[in-house]
Image (cartoon, rainbow, N blue to C red):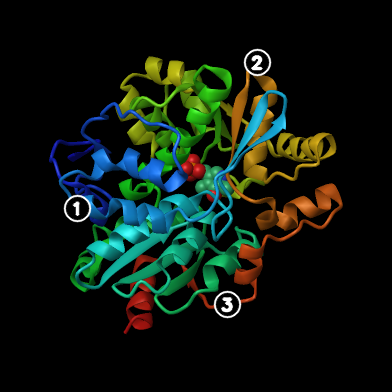
Amino acid sequence: MKYLSTRGHDLIDFATAIQSGLAPDGGLYVPQTFPKIKLENLPYAELVTALIKPFVKDSPLEQQIADICEKAFNFPVPLTQLNDNTQLLELFHGPTVAFKDFGARFLAECMNRLATKKMTLMIATSGDTGSAVASAFHGKENIQVVILYPEGKISERQAHQINCWGDNILSLAVQGTFDDCQRLVKSAFTNANWQAYTHLSTANSINIGRLLPQMGYYAYSSLQYFQQYGVGARFIVPSGNLGNITAAFWAKQIGCPITEIVAATNANAIVPDYIRTGNFEPKRSVETLANAMDVGNPSNFERLKYLFQTHESFAENMPAYAVTDAQITDTIKETYQKYQKIICPHTATACYVRNQLSDKPWIVVATADASKFEETIEPMLNIEIPVPPALQLLLKKPSHFISVVADEEVIFNTVKKYFS
Ligand SMILES: *Cc1c(COP(=O)(O)O)cnc(C)c1O
């Protein structure tokens, strides 16, 4: 299997694609083809192995993929019933209790096996990516990790989950927005100082090594859904940078029984606006309750555009709805009152959208455990949210981070000093 850039044609293998993150022409890597893969209900890690195998063919990782999947996916992926015609695909049973564990853990296993000399991963995060990547890469000796997050704009608990690692994980609290963080990471890739200092890569959702394994849970749950209802699954995906939903479309491409995929965004309505108007207009992100989705310029739009080609096809295939903070709040309250289920603000955007759609059975993709957002949810529901054991473990560790201004040179010098 070869990979090409959304903006060009140079074909490279899987190992090269995950190690470089962004393509040299500024585009994002996509598989050259989507082979139809015949899948059957299997234990999770085995199913993902079968699914990923064609995508790592002819790369140095081909023979190790079963072992990689066994190590990366060592937690449950339950599909639970919320009501008669709504299921929750619970993607928050990994070590940092959000779905980003899937991509981060797979990528860490791959990169660790590929790294022959020291390399640096640099990532911008609006919350959950940072903790998932830090957890997945902590202690991997050939990889140093730099994490940038917007200081004060993510919850204390989220920040702690990024700051609690130390060692090969440098946590930078940037005085700016998530978009500033993302811009700083992008600019490092074209900066000569960085190139001279280290081999730089990224673990953001632009990295193909995070996207591919995310097809796994769409395959797994759509097969179960098909068995239950005899028709293809319908998913609603809480979306920000659009990585998760891109994986859903790719799973459909390879032949998983999926009929509909709908995006739910928060007030950062870039995609719903694009679908309505045909104009893709990135904006400064606004802060919402679903802060891991506060993205004003979703990177993976480029991959979806590459897949759909035209605005018409995009709009036809991917309905998208924006959900306000007030609607998120109402949905969290209503879901708790009706079903005694505590959902996170991101999951709430998809639950809200679900309530606007048909009676047909839908799967709401539940992206994080509510206990990560206790500051938001506890006052709403007037309860104390139980903290899952995985999270309790992290919260007990001490915190390490450096606060920096949103400046390229300051960040470069801080990183060099920390790892010297
Ligand atoms: C990252 C994240 C999202 C958004 O996923 P994208 O792939 O960026 O669209 C949704 N919910 C949670 C909890 C997240 O951490």
Element on which disc 1 rests: helix
Element on which disc 2 rests: loop
Q: Badge 3: how crowded within 10 Å, few (<14), some, or many (20+)?
A: some
Residue furthest toward the left? 10
Residue furthest toward the right? 382
Q: Badge 2: how crowded within 10 Å, few (<14), some, or many (20+)?
A: few
Q: Residue at x 35, y 82 (%)?
A: 417
Amino acid type, residue under disc 2 in the picture = Ser
**As drawn, is 215 to the left or to the right of 356?**
left
Query: Could you say which disc has been placed on residue 358 in the image?
Result: 2
Where on the picture, by quarter, is residue 315? top left
Where on the picture, by quarter, is residue 113? bottom left
Query: Could you say which disc has been placed on residue 399 in the image?
Result: 3
243 w.r.t. 36: above or below: below
Count of numbered circles in the view: 3
- Residue 318: percent from the left, percent from the top? 47, 23
Amino acid type, residue under disc 1 in the picture = Thr
Task: Tell me the distance, in whole angstroms, between the alpha carbons under discs 2 and 3.
Answer: 46 Å
